[in-house]
Image: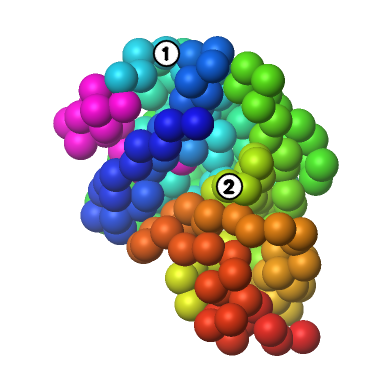
Amino acid sequence: MRITHSPIGELNTNCYLITDEESGESAAVDCALFNADYEALLKKAGVTSLKYILLTHGHFDHISGVKRLKEACGGQIVIHTEDAACLTDPKKSLNSYVRFAGLETVAPDLTVEEGDDLFLGRRRFTVMHTPGHTPGSVCYLTEGLLFCGDTLFRQSMGRTDLPGGSTLTLLSSLSRIARLEGEYEIFPGHGETTTLAYEKRNNRYMRMK
């Protein structure tokens, strides 16, 4: 699995491109903006077409470039059912409340739920519903890798003071992540990558009940 990423947009959203090297199939995880920086990311990753555009949740800083990315590279737009309206409703995505976001609305191609599986070649990506930051926040898990959006950050967690957020719900989601078996490299929506073992030792939110 080849993973290329870059922080893009005014909120430095981590945008990931992942390629299954055996099959050559690729997916994007979140797209803050489709701009020169994102085009440079595509070139660096050697990606010209996508099978999926995987969205971790529906806030504007993770979805604003999705329409143009799909037009450029194809790919099914994937989002949890409870955040699907964010792609077409600027209020739900919070785009209406910020000065700099340039959301272009687009309909999802595929809505997912807890436990759904997606494949790049023979590599399985499992959807883990982790609400709390938004009602439809998800993580995508595959063979020791976890793409978690704004659910979990290095030694921190996503904010819960925005519409649809819930601290208790997010803590419950983090508790589920902490109970995953084995080790995972964690790719968050903002900031540094981390590991599950490190967060279980050092992230106080992972230990709250």
Per the image, the residue denoted by label 1 is 49
- The spot of residue 145 in percent (x, y) is 58, 47
- The spot of residue 14 in percent (x, y) is 37, 49
Query: In this picture, which residue range is highlighted in magenta?
Result: 30-45
Q: Report the front residue among 87 and 15.
A: 15
Quarter of the picture containing the C terminus is: bottom right
**Tag 2: residue type?**
Leu
**Tag 1: residue type?**
Ser
At 68% from the left and 20% from the top, the residue drawn is: 122
Mark 1 falls on what kind of element?
loop
Snapshot colouring: rainbow
Using a 10 Å C-alpha cutoff, classify the residue at mark 1 as few (fewer than 14 neighbours), some (14 to 19) or many (20 or more). some
**Mark positioned earlier in the residue sequence (1 or 2):** 1
Q: Is residue 201 visible?
A: yes
Magenta span: helix, strand or loop, mainly? helix
Residue 110, placed above or below residue 88: above
In front: mark 1 or mark 2?
A: 2
Classify residue 27 as left or right of residue 102.
right
- The spot of residue 21 in percent (x, y) is 48, 20
Residue 160, placed above or below residue 10: below
Per the image, the residue denoted by label 2 is 145
Q: Report the front residue among 156 and 66.
A: 156
- The spot of residue 205 in percent (x, y) is 61, 81
Q: Is residue 87 visible?
A: no
Q: Are marks 1 and 2 in contact (CB under 8 Å)?
A: no
